[in-house]
Image (spheres, helix red, strand yellow):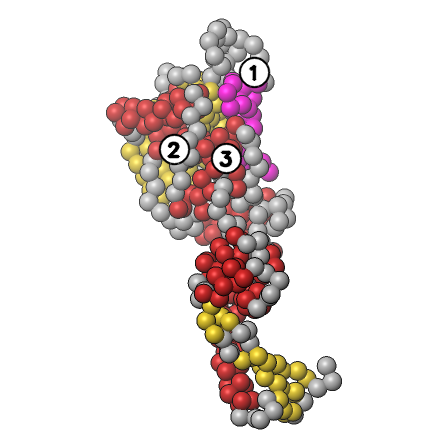
Amino acid sequence: MSRKKTERDAGPGTGGGAGQPDLFGGAGDAPAGISPSGADKAAPSGPAPLAFSFSKLSMYEECPLKFKFKYVDKLPEKPKPYFAFGNSVHAALEFFHDPAHKEAPPLEKLLAAFKEEWDSRDWREKGYGDPFRSDADYQAGLKMLTGYYRKHHAAFAPPFLVEYSTDVEVDGLMVRIIADKIEHAGGGELTLIDYKTGKDVRRSPDQLHMYQKICELDPALREKLAERYAVPVSAVRVKELRFYHVPTLKEYSFPRADDFAIGLFWERVLRAAEGVRERRFPPRPGDFQCRFCDFRSSCPVHAAEPARAPDGLAELAGEYEAARAKADALRIKLIAALKAVPSGSVQAGPFSLALKNGPRWTFRDREAVISLLREHGCYDRACAPLLSRVAELVDDESLPEEFRRSLRLLAEPGGAADVEVRRRGE
């Protein structure tokens, strides 16, 4: 079973591409004088074409610096569960729609293809935090594919191609696409279908526009049409574009994009490619993209921010605050009760309770106290500073009188009491 790959990590193509192009060069494995699209022509004398794809366009437009971290610096990324899930569903659908099948394979084999891809990595490698969430997604995948099978198996017809990967050189770019499914409508007209397994959201057809442009330029696709249907094809023409949302079994169709729409889209591609060539990688921060970015710790925008709190820490802090407030209320009640005892101490069941005197002085202006302590070299003696230690400094005759007088001006008479509770025998 072949594994579904995104355009970002795809290896050598199954279409015209002879090898994986690197970021700033052409396909490394293509023989000299042979273009990655399969057409014979002389080796170009100019700079090597820039490897590009819709995924790279999307990332550059989202944040050029993120693009640099991933494709230029090649910083590692964390595995994403949704990639693992999507890859497994795509692998199952690739098996189901294999053009070699004359009829729909049984449901059991479709689910087995999903399981084979799913089991190729454990839950940690797929990026899950625990095995239970991985198991839940596995069950969701089985349910999703069962629904897909029930809807489509009766009208099954083998498509022209599935998981068609190709690299085509155009305008100084080596553009890679991976089309999930291509259907032939006759006369060289095609329908391009891309499966989605994430949220059911309104999607722009930009990705499909790139697929339309590249498919219509791809000489290898014309050759495959002629080979498959034994009909010479002078030109490939995309007739329809579709997103298929597998979880809801919904199809979203778009008509063929006209030259104006393709031109506007291609201007975006060329602007992004120019930015990459000229090494323009400014950060483009935003609440959503920054929150989920794997390169946040390397980004200068977030260099000085505190570490992200672990999950559940806010709830623990809330519980601590509530417990501390309850403990303070109980301490006040205990102090009031002990003040009614002449000795200030008493035995109560297994506990020994005694009043303790608080500091003689209290301070409200903390910043002024800290400034004065630093000025006279006493900050460390106050232990960064504890108010009980600061209060001791007021009466410390070893310190300069001027300092003690200044500190006293910041102080107010204390007199607060505290309580000590111990179990007898401790």
Q: Where is residue 161 shown, x and y percent of the image?
A: 47, 31
Helix, strand or loop at mark 3: loop
| Residue 247 falls left or right of residue 331 | left
Under mark 3, the amino acid is: Thr
Q: Quadrant of the N terminus?
A: top right
Q: Which mark is residue 358?
A: none
Marks 3/1 in contact by CB < 8 Å: the verdict is no
**Residue beneath disc 2:** 61
| Residue 92 falls left or right of residue 346 | left
How far, Cα to Cα, is label 2 from label 3?
A: 18 Å
Helix, strand or loop at mark 2: helix
Magenta-drawn segment: 1-28
Within the magenta stretch, is there residue 24? Answer: yes
How far, Cα to Cα, is label 3 from label 1?
A: 21 Å
Q: Nearer the viewer, residue 121 or 237?
A: 121
The residue positioned 42% from the left and 31% from the top of the image is: 282
The residue positioned 39% from the left and 16% from the top of the image is: 171
Helix, strand or loop at mark 1: loop
Q: Nearer the viewer, residue 252 or 375?
A: 375
Disc 1 packing (10 Å; few <14; some 14–19; many ≥20): some
Q: Is residue 289 above or below residue 347?
A: above
| Residue farthest front in this picture | 401
Q: Main secondary structure of the magenta part?
A: loop
- Callout in the foreground (2, 1): 2
**Residue beneath disc 3:** 6
